[in-house]
Amino acid sequence: MPAQPIVAFDRVSLAFDDNPVLDSVSFSVAAGETRIILGPAGCGKSVLLKLVNGLLRPDSGRIHVFGEDITDLPERDLYPLRARIGMVFQESALFDSLSVHDNVAYRMTQDHTPVAESDARVLESLRFVELEDTVNLFPSELSGGMRRRVAIARAVVSRPELILYDSPTAGLDPITSATIIELLVKQRDVSHTTALVVTHRMQDTFTLATHAYDTASHRMVPMDKSGPNRGVDPRTRYLVLKDGRVVFDGDTPALTASPDPWLKDFIS
């Protein structure tokens, strides 16, 4: 019997002020999979993440997360579910008045985690993003790329089963973007965390799909094209939206080989 999907949408539709955003969207995400969500601006990519997290409700259709139907779940019952999900917001969304330590520890502080455990987990997460030396700094003292890495540390500190990345490289230069993508690859390959990644950068998507994290060298490396997967990570798949509808749902070889004219133009 196939394993239960971590996320499943069944004919989900949503409109704001009679303007359709998502139109009968159906897809599922397996455990350990990285699902990259692509599409033109305004096609509903970020809205989709908010639906997964229960921050928005669909007008119709059903949403299951961790096997639980969250479509009509009361707000109080969403708290345990959200504790299993990490979120990296657009532009990082750090608290300016809190130190790096307190930003990363924020959820554990709200959950009254013992201080010693919280401190240890914060340092572990900052080491993961290679920013342990910033623990006492404030967001205003960090570069844009460093703030984004702190946001990732905050998302992974609770060891979530699912991470939602909303445009994690938006506004960053190519070199810094590559550093962020390396962290996503590291989280995928070392922690095997299921992820949904909204992005506008095609270069980022193909880097995710064709690279692996080498624990010996502690860096991201291209996958072996002569290997069984021909240089492509089979756990990295795509969902492409257009006008609120799914126009592609599949893996990298299928995406690059698609004969659809619009899709070919979009990914070129």
Image (cartoon, rainbow, N blue to C red):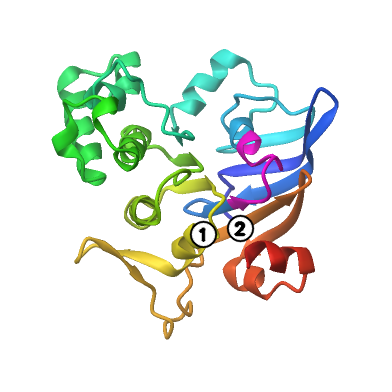
Identify the residue under disc 1: 205
* Relative horizontal placement of residue 59, taking residue 127 as reference (left or right): right
- Asked if the stretch drawn in magenta spans residue 87, the answer is no
Residue sitting at the far right: 18
| Residue at screen point 48% across, 80% down | 230
| Residue at screen point 29% across, 40% down | 146
- The picture places residue 181, in percent across and down from the top left corner, at 39, 54
* Numbered tag placed on residue 136 in the rendering: none
| Residue at screen point 41% across, 33% down | 92
Labelled pair 1, 2 in contact (Cβ < 8 Å): yes
Residue 99 visible in this rendered orientation of the protein: yes
Q: Amino acid at mark 1?
A: Thr
* Relative horizontal placement of residue 268, taking residue 217 as reference (left or right): right
Identify the residue under disc 2: 238
- The picture places residue 256, in percent across and down from the top left corner, at 63, 72
Task: Report crowding for label 2: few under 14, some 14 to 19, many 20 or more residues within 10 A (C-alpha).
Answer: many
Task: Report crowding for label 1: few under 14, some 14 to 19, many 20 or more residues within 10 A (C-alpha).
Answer: many
Q: Is residue 20 above or below residue 175?
A: above
Residue 1 visible in this rendered orientation of the protein: no
- Asked if the stretch drawn in magenta spans residue 41, the answer is yes
Range drawn in magenta: 37-48
For residue 161, what is the image quadrant? top left
The N terminus - image quarter: bottom right
Q: Amino acid at mark 2?
A: Tyr
